Image (cartoon, helix red, strand yellow):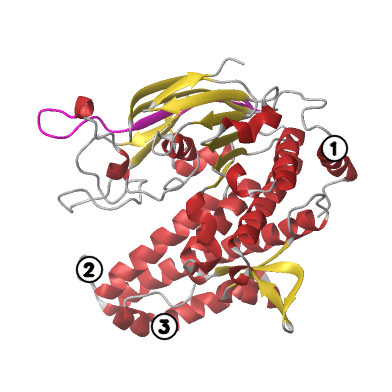
Amino acid sequence: MSLGRGALVNVRAQSDRNPIADLTQAANGIAHLTLSAFRGFRDLTLELEARPLVVTGPNGGGKTNLLEAVSYLAPGTGLRGAGLREVDCRLPANQGSGGSGRAWAVHARYRGKMGEFGLGTGRDPREEMGENGDGENGKTENGNGRERRLCRIEGSNAKSQAAFAEILSVLWLTPSMDRLFQDRPSVRRRFMDRLTTGLHPEHPSRVSAYEQAMRDRARILRGDGPAMERAERDRWLSGLEAEMAAQAVAIAAARLETTEALNAAMAEAVGPFPRADLAIDGAVELSLRERPALEAEDLLRERLATARDADAAAGITQWGAHRSDLAVAFHGRMLGSAALNAAEASTGEQKALLIAILLAQARLACARRGEGPVLLLDEVAAHLDPERRRHLYAEVLALKAQAWFTGTEAELFKPLRDAAQFFTLRDARVLRDVA
């Protein structure tokens, strides 16, 4: 996929001069943010402009917590992957007489291409939820149900968290992701699925449906639930395996299309960041490359049916989209006779590679969705040399993306002084800087 020369010329022009030149407002962004009982914030309200933000302050002051709150405007478990109760504010002023306090909540007004939307999310304050809840963040304290994350759009309950992805895209890069390429395959797979969601907003719904069918199949294989005859059991399993196969192939197709588009975007990139070659390593993706989608579905359905006894004995599901991994290599760099795997590069180069992938994703989102993602960049500038830092700022401004930068030193963001809104965060208090 080509982004078109206009978009690339814009980025090149910005990167070759002062990044503040020809500054315009971001095309989209969060205009209002309210946090209630969220980690160290008992209550916080911010009125914002549709342009980049710089939030500075000492370590431990709450900068990452602020970005985490914004990350809950995307489907999933936020940038920390925390359980729902872990996010609740534990300050004494938030605790009730029984030791439990208010459930956390995030509210935002987002202005984008489709208009302005009020978005709300937070932990359902009810003590116990049934199995039909939207949430996937673990069981309640008494173990009898699942906690649920509520999601509302313009005051009405959304069907699922995935509804947020239809309105906006949120991407993040945090210090904890520095070891992404050495981490577990599941971590890279979630990262890939976030990238895929930016281009395919329906992707989270497919992943959720697939995982629900997989959990239901696993319960039946374990013998949980009501007793049933073998024929009835097989009918239930066949239906769930058909659902898994259909969703898995759609998930794999979206992942493959996204990696191809990202590879093309990085091939056309201008600037000092390294180029990555992305690939999906998974049986479903391989099957889809070799045969039509319907045949790939049939093959996965057959594999699942054949593996029932083995899956029941091992307590795992051996086949499916949940076993895929994201493979990343440095383009044009070799280690012996093989391409240099990202996991074997230096920490600094891995960080630069992650930034390159996120910038490519932002360019694609602009081209596909007509607006860039909200970028959450936690402590990124401190680990970049001046040239890469300058280019990052230039590209963010050229993309007209609302990026949230955090750091301990405001001096690192001096090139953005006339382009961004600056805040100081200390002891969970956020103050707007006055130039």
The foreground one among 210 and 79 is: 79
Query: Measuring 56% from the left and 65% from the top, which residue is drawn there?
Result: 181
Q: Which label belongs to residue 224? A: 2
**Viewer-side label of 1, 2:** 1
Q: Which label belongs to residue 22? A: none
Disc 3 from disc 1: Cα separation: 53 Å
Q: Which x, y percent locates residue 305?
A: 43, 80
- Closer to the chain start, of discs 1 and 2, is 1
Instruction: Please tell me how crowded label 2 is: few (under 14), some (14-19), or many (20+) other residues with Cα within 10 Å.
Output: few
Q: Is residue 251 magenta?
A: no
Q: Is residue 365 left or right of residue 166?
A: right
Helix, strand or loop at mark 2: loop
Q: Is residue 191 above or below residue 229?
A: above
Query: Measuring 39% from the left and 59% from the top, which residue is drawn there?
Result: 212
The foreground one among 311 and 282 is: 282
The foreground one among 338 and 256 is: 338
The residue stretch that appears in magenta: 95-119
Residue pointed to by mark 1 = 10
Q: Which x, y percent locates residue 420?
A: 65, 25
Query: Measuring 57% from the left and 76% from the top, which residue is drawn there?
Result: 283
Disc 1 from disc 2: Cα separation: 58 Å
Residue pointed to by mark 3 = 307
Instruction: Please tell me how crowded label 3 is: few (under 14), some (14-19), or many (20+) other residues with Cα within 10 Å.
Output: some
Q: Which x, y percent locates residue 405?
A: 58, 36
Instruction: Please tell me how crowded label 1 is: few (under 14), some (14-19), or many (20+) other residues with Cα within 10 Å.
Output: some
Most distant residue in the top direction: 434
**Viewer-side label of 3, 1:** 1
